């Protein structure tokens, strides 16, 4: 089965500096978990989450899995991947 290729506008508007930083990190690393994003960029958890949420809404990244932490009922860690092809 062929996968349908998604086309994106040539210009994507990033609303905040945090979106730009998170997207740049995804371009470098391709797959990241939310704790890694906040740690690597020195952001608060809330700022990192909001930037990731907006990038998902713009279809630039997508969630690929959710991992439950070891403690029963512990917080979940979401893992995301870059969802666009970068040319050049």
Image (spheres, rainbow, N blue to C red):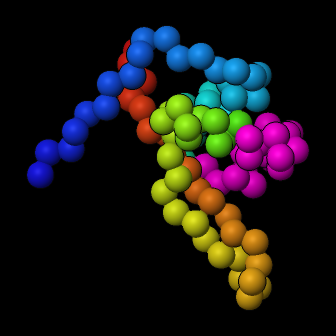
Q: Give the camera-side residue of 63 and 32.
A: 63
Q: Quadrant of the C terminus?
A: top left
Farthest-out residue, left = 1
Q: Quadrant of residue 84?
A: top left
Q: Number of labelled discs?
A: 0
Residue 27 in the image, given as x and y percentages of width and height: 54, 31
* Identity of the residue drawn at 39% across and 29% down: 85
- In the image, residue 19 above or below residue 81: above
x 42%, y 12%: residue: 10
Is residue 64 covered in magenta? no
Task: Report the span colored magenta.
Answer: 32-50
Q: Quadrant of residue 40?
A: top right
Farthest front residue in view: 57
Q: Residue 31 at what x, y percent from top left?
A: 54, 48
Residue 5: percent from the left, percent from the top?
Answer: 26, 33
Residue that sits furthest to the bottom in the current view:
72
Question: Residue at left 69%, top 69%?
Answer: 76
Note whether 10 is above or below 60 in the view shown: above
Locate residue 86: give its quadrant: top left
**Residue 28 visible in the picture:** no
> Residue 57: x percent and y percent?
55, 37
In-front residue for pair 85/15: 15
Residue at x 82% of width, y 40% of height: 47
Q: Is residue 17 visible?
A: yes
Name the dominant secondary structure of the magenta segment. helix
Residue 38: in magenta span = yes
Q: Is residue 4 left or right of residue 44?
A: left
Give the left or right position of residue 12, taking residue 43 as reference: left
Depth check: 31 or 46 in front? 46
């Amino acid at each position: 089965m062929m996968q349908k290729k998604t086309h994106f506008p040539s210009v994507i508007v990033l609303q905040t500096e945090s979106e730009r930083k998170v997207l740049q990190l995804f371009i470098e690393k391709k797959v990241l978990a939310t704790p890694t994003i906040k740690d690597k960029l020195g952001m608060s958890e809330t700022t990192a989450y909001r930037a990731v949420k907006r990038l998902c809404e713009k279809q630039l990244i997508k969630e690929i899995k959710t991992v439950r932490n070891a403690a029963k009922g512990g917080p979940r860690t979401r893992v995301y991947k870059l969802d666009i092809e970068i040319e050049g």
